[in-house]
Amino acid sequence: MRLTATTTDEQIVERALGGDREAFGEIVRRWECKIYALAAGFLGSPEDARDATQETFIAAYRNLQGFRGEAKVSSWLHRIAVNQCISRQRRARARPETGVEDELEARGEGFLATGDQASPARRAETGERAEAVRRAVASLPPELREVVLMKEFEGLTFQEIADALGIPLSTVKSRLYTALGQLRLRLEKFRQEAASR
Amino acid sequence: MNEQKRTNAQGGCGRAEDLVAYLYGEADQHASQDFQTHLGACASCREELAAFGGVRASVAVWRGSLLDASEAPSLAENFATSAPARQAFATPAPRERSALAALREFFALSPLWLKGATAAFALAFCALAVVALRAGVGGERVITQVVTKTVEVPAPPSEEQVNELVERRVESRLAELAKQSAPQRETVVKASAPAPARNRPRAEVAQTGAPRRKSPAPSAARRNELFREDSESLPRLSDLLSGSY
């Protein structure tokens, strides 16, 4: 059977389990951007995001047998990605001299790099705003952050997030509401600080 | 603090979930119309909805800057060619396979020396199995014989047989004792009647060799002869007891 756009993720996984090594490559191609976006939002560093994305797909491949088709492949992948990101953050925090945020600030680079086609003023404005959001998201508790990233970065539905995280639908909504409220407060605070400078 | 969290989670008017569903366009038509009606009357929800929209716009800017950093497009190539990914994909995805398929794969992937060693081991195992099988058949015969012999051993006597045997032994023993005790009784009777012996005339006593205690011990034949003579001359115990003597 040839892989087409209409072939579902579950069918592709079934083929991968049957020994088709190319099939899992299709899963990677389909989901790598979204998983990368999730990891980038979670970790803040492109390098860490790339590593976490790679680790996510490797872990998924190694645990392909554990996928029983009860949830969507996307939910399953996101769950693995969130776990990978949380593990990486814990490891980074265990090294006090190389905290994620400190590392980014010391390098003065990272995810804020924008296209060369933007004007310097525009880049500065976008960069400042994005940095404020990054800091605000980074300060959220993990259970709120993962919900925001899955919704905003990947566009998953509430039900898909609930399936991926194994929590009730209402919990997804309430967490998202709380997260948006906290982001709002933090962004306002950053805005006031920037205005006072 | 907890109160603030609770208020944050429930929203100013307790319709937090409806607000979020409306914000992300996931409310169904009826819920959406219902919340729109509510927005017309609730300033708090209107203000919150506008603020959350601003937050989402800021997050979108961040997302755009993050994904425009030209990392994601190169990920596919990087991932496919990265060393950890190649290492992971070098082996097929683990799956429950049949034993035959696993064996085939094992032999397909094994080096030549491992195949040879496995074959030699398999042959040795088969040879041992045959030997063990033969030994097992012989051993079964031996066991059969042993069992046969064991069956031939007489069964232990029953309680009745034991009782009968004991009775027979007891009777025979009693008979022997009775035979032995009969002469002894007569001897006892003779020994327990000293008075008449003492009252006998001294000549008679001398004739019979009395008193016996002082004489040397006679032989068995002589003793029987003397006993017969004495028993003929002595009164019987029954006569003494009845007083007819």
Image (cartoon, helix red, strand yellow):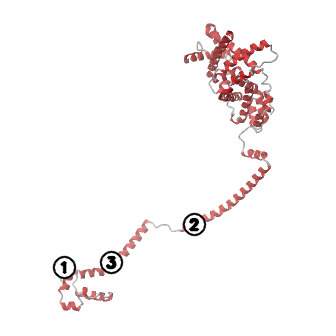
User: Which residue lies under the disc numbered 2?
Assistant: B148
User: Which residue lies under the disc numbered 3?
Assistant: B178
Q: Quadrant of the C terminus of chain A?
A: top right
- The amino acid marked with disc number 2 is Thr
The answer to whether residue B99 shows anywhere in this view is: yes
Query: In the rendering, at what x and y percent does residue B55 appear?
Result: 68, 14
- Quarter of the image for residue B69 reads top right
Vertical order, B159 against A100 (above or below)? below
Element assignment for label 3: helix
Write the residue at 38% across / 75% down.
B172
Write the residue at 69% across / 61% down.
B131
Q: Which mark is residue B242?
A: 1
Q: Chain of mark 1?
A: B
Cα–Cα gap, marks 3 and 2:
47 Å
**A55 or B230, which is in the foreground?**
A55
Q: Sequence order check: which comes first, mark 3 or mark 1?
A: 3
The answer to whether residue A42 shows anywhere in this view is: no
Q: Sequence order check: which comes first, mark 3 or mark 2?
A: 2
Cα–Cα gap, marks 2 and 1:
71 Å
